[in-house]
Image (cartoon, rainbow, N blue to C red):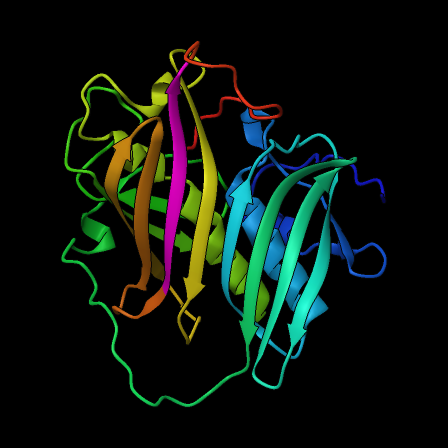
C-alpha cells in the first residue's frame, strides 16, 4: 500500500475535500488518509465519502445514486487505508460495485454502491422541507472546521445528558467551498450523515448523552445507507433533518433527509448506531468506543 502521511494542517472543508479525493493505487484500488480529530478513529461517514469518490473514478461514465455501508472494524487515522473495488455490473443504464475498506490485511468496512446515468422524469414528487425556521433563527454550535458553519434548531448542545427533547434534531450547515465536481459534492453531503444521529436517539432520555462516550457509554456508527436525489447541487445552507424511530437492545435507528434552504430534497439517509454500557459484553475485535459528534 502506498504510504500516506498524517495531515499536519488544521481541519477545514478544503482539507476534507482533499481527503475525500482518494488516489489511484493500482488496478481497482485506491488509497486514502484521514483526519480522526482527537478520537484517533475515522468516522464511518468519511469512509462513505471516500467510497463515493472511488466508485465515481472507477466508473466515470456513471454517477453514484446510492450507497450502503457496514462498519465492522475501526480505522486508525494515523495510518493510510485502501479501498478495493469489485465492479459487479456495467450496463447501459446502471452499474454496481462493492468497495472494501482495508487497513493492512484487516477488513474494516464493506460498501455496496449503485450508480446510474441521467434520465428524464417520468413522474416526480418529494418530501417538503420541515417547518423549522431559517438558519438565522437557529442556534450556532461549535464543531470546529474552517469553512463549515453549523446551527441547530431548538438546542444549544446535543451532547448534554440533561438536554431533553423529542428524538428529532435539525441542523443547518453551510460549507465554503462548495465543490463543483459532482462526486465531491455527493461526498461532502455524505460526510455529515454520521454526525448527529446517535445524539438524536439519546435526546429524549435524561442522563444519557454523547458527552458520556468513553466514560459510561460505548457508541459507534455501525451502518449508513444514503440515496441521492437529483439534482445534487446547492449554493448556501443545507438542512439535515434527523428522526430516531427506535432504540433498544443496544442499537439505535435514525432516518434523515438533506434539503437545500429553498426546500429541494437532495438526499435521504439512515443510520444504525451502537449504544451500550461498558462491561455488558466484550466489544468485537477492532471496535473502539467513540463519540459520534
Is any atom of residue 85 visible in this view?
yes
Q: Residue at x 46, y 36 (%)?
A: 221
Q: Position of residue 144 (x, y in %)?
A: 46, 36
Q: Which residues are magenta?
A: 267-277
For residue 205, side relative to residue 228 (left or right): left
Residue 203 or 178: which is nearer the viewer? 203
Residue 153 or 278: which is nearer the viewer? 278
Q: Say if 33 sits above or below 227 in the image.
A: above
For residue 154, side relative to residue 179 (left or right): left
Quadrant assignment, res 76: top right
Q: Quadrant of the N terminus?
A: top right
Q: Say if 230 sits above or below 102 in the image.
A: below
Total numbered badges shown on the rendered structure: 0
Q: Say if 11 sits above or below 23 in the image.
A: above
Q: Residue at x 20, y 19 (%)?
A: 162
The answer to whether residue 23 is magenta is no
Q: Say if 147 sits above or below 287 in the image.
A: below
Q: Residue at x 60, y 68 (%)?
A: 96
For residue 224, side relative to residue 270 (left or right): right
Quadrant assignment, res 131: bottom left
Q: Position of residue 94 (x, y in %)?
A: 57, 78
Is any atom of residue 176 visible in this view?
no
Instruction: Give the overall secondary structure of the magenta segment.
Output: strand
Q: Position of residue 258 (x, y in %)?
A: 34, 59
Q: Quadrant of the C terminus?
A: top left
Q: Position of residue 31 (x, y in %)?
A: 76, 49
The answer to whether residue 272 is magenta is yes
For residue 140, side relative to residue 184 (left or right): left
Q: Residue at x 20, y 35 (%)?
A: 155
Amino acid at each position: 500500500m502506498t504510504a500516506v502521511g498524517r495531515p499536519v494542517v488544521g481541519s477545514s472543508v478544503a482539507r476534507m475535500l482533499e481527503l475525500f479525493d482518494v488516489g489511484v493505487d493500482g488496478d481497482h484500488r485506491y488509497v486514502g488518509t484521514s483526519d480522526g480529530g482527537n478520537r484517533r478513529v475515522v468516522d464511518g461517514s468519511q469512509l462513505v465519502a471516500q467510497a463515493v469518490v472511488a466508485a465515481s473514478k472507477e466508473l466515470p461514465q456513471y454517477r453514484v445514486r446510492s450507497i450502503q455501508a457496514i462498519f465492522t472494524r475501526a480505522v486508525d487515522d494515523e495510518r493510510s487505508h485502501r479501498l478495493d473495488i469489485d465492479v459487479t455490473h456495467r450496463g447501459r443504464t446502471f452499474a454496481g460495485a462493492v468497495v472494501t475498506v482495508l487497513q493492512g490485511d484487516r477488513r474494516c468496512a464493506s460498501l455496496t454502491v449503485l450508480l446510474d446515468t441521467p434520465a428524464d422524469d417520468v413522474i416526480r414528487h418529494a418530501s417538503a422541507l420541515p417547518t423549522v425556521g431559517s438558519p438565522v433563527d437557529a442556534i450556532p454550535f461549535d464543531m470546529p472546521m474552517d469553512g463549515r458553519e453549523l446551527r441547530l434548531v431548538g438546542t444549544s448542545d446535543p451532547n448534554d445528558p440533561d438536554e431533553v427533547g423529542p428524538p428529532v434534531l435539525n441542523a443547518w450547515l453551510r460549507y465554503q467551498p462548495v465543490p463543483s465536481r459532482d462526486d465531491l459534492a455527493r461526498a461532502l453531503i455524505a460526510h455529515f450523515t454520521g454526525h448527529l444521529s446517535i445524539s438524536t436517539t439519546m435526546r429524549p432520555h435524561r442522563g444519557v448523552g454523547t458527552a458520556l462516550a468513553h466514560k459510561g457509554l460505548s457508541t459507534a456508527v455501525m451502518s449508513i445507507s444514503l440515496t441521492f436525489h437529483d439534482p445534487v447541487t446547492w449554493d448556501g445552507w443545507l438542512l439535515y433533518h434527523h428522526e430516531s424511530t427506535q432504540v433498544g437492545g443496544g442499537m439505535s435507528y435514525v432516518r434523515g433527509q438533506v434539503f437545500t434552504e429553498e426546500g429541494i430534497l437532495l438526499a435521504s439517509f439512515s443510520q444504525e448506531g451502537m449504544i451500550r454500557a461498558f462491561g455488558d459484553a466484550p466489544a468485537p475485535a477492532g471496535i473502539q468506543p467513540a463519540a459520534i459528534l
